[in-house]
Amino acid sequence: MFKGKKRNTISKIVEENLDYLFRFAFYRIGNREEAEDIVYEAILKLLEKNTKEIKLESVRSYLFRIVLNLCIDKQRNQNNDIVWIEELDIEDDAIDIAEKLEFERVDTYLKNIEPQEADVIRMKIMGDITFVEISNILSIPQSTAKSRFKSGMEKLRKLFTENKES
């Protein structure tokens, strides 16, 4: 259990990154409630960790790594089929529908590029994560994270341009 100054610092880091963690999970999973559950599960896992195992400077990266792993597990358990669109019911409000449609639009493009590139793009854009942090989270060199981002963005631009012209 975290105590004193370390606890306050970790609480501040979690609070500052909550929106980014949620946005990253949402654009990986496509379901608001599941994304919220994943983020809170990640925070619980962090809090259950032995305080000596976590350095303050790596808390943010650690949280994103947990969220990524939980998203991968969730998708694996769903046999990689996202069925949320069929789950819409009349009680959903316009914001939820708009979020789901936005997710579908973004996800459609991201599914057309390599999964490794898509993950880096999600982390960088939706998670506001630096390339240094991405390299730590994915256990890859920083140059690889940058090249995956650049390559993925080039592919997305090409897809977007092709679809815009159609």
Image (cartoon, rainbow, N blue to C red):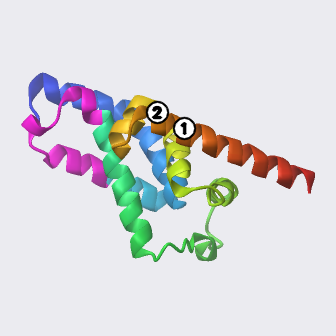
Q: Which residue is mark 1?
A: 147
Q: Amino acid at mark 2?
A: Ser
- Which quarter shows the C terminus? bottom right
Report if residue 59 is visible in the image.
yes
Of residues 61 and 87, which is closer to you in this image?
61
Q: Which of the two residues, 120 or 2, is positioned nearer the viewer here?
A: 120
Picture coordinates of residue 51 (x, y %)?
10, 37
99, above or below 20, in the image: below
Please provide the residue range marked out in magenta: 41-59
Query: Which residue lies at the image location 48% right of the left edge and 47% below the top edge?
Result: 24
Q: Foreground: 157 or 35? A: 157
Rendering coords of residue 145 (x, y %):
47, 38
* Residue name at image x 70 percent, y 47 percent: 156
Q: Amino acid at mark 1?
A: Ser
In the image: residue 111, left or right of residue 51 = right
Residue farthest to the right, as pictured: 166
Would you say residue 149 sits in the magenta stretch? no
Residue for point 54% across, 38% down: 147
Q: Is residue 129 visible?
A: no
Residue 143: mark in rendering: 2
* SS category of the residue bearing label 2: helix
> Residue 111: horizontal and vertical position, in percent?
62, 60
Q: Left of 95 or right of it: where is 118?
A: left
Q: Position of residue 155 (x, y in %)?
A: 69, 48
Quarter of the figure with the N terminus: top left
Instruction: Give the residue displayed 11% in from the left and 35% down from the top.
Output: 2
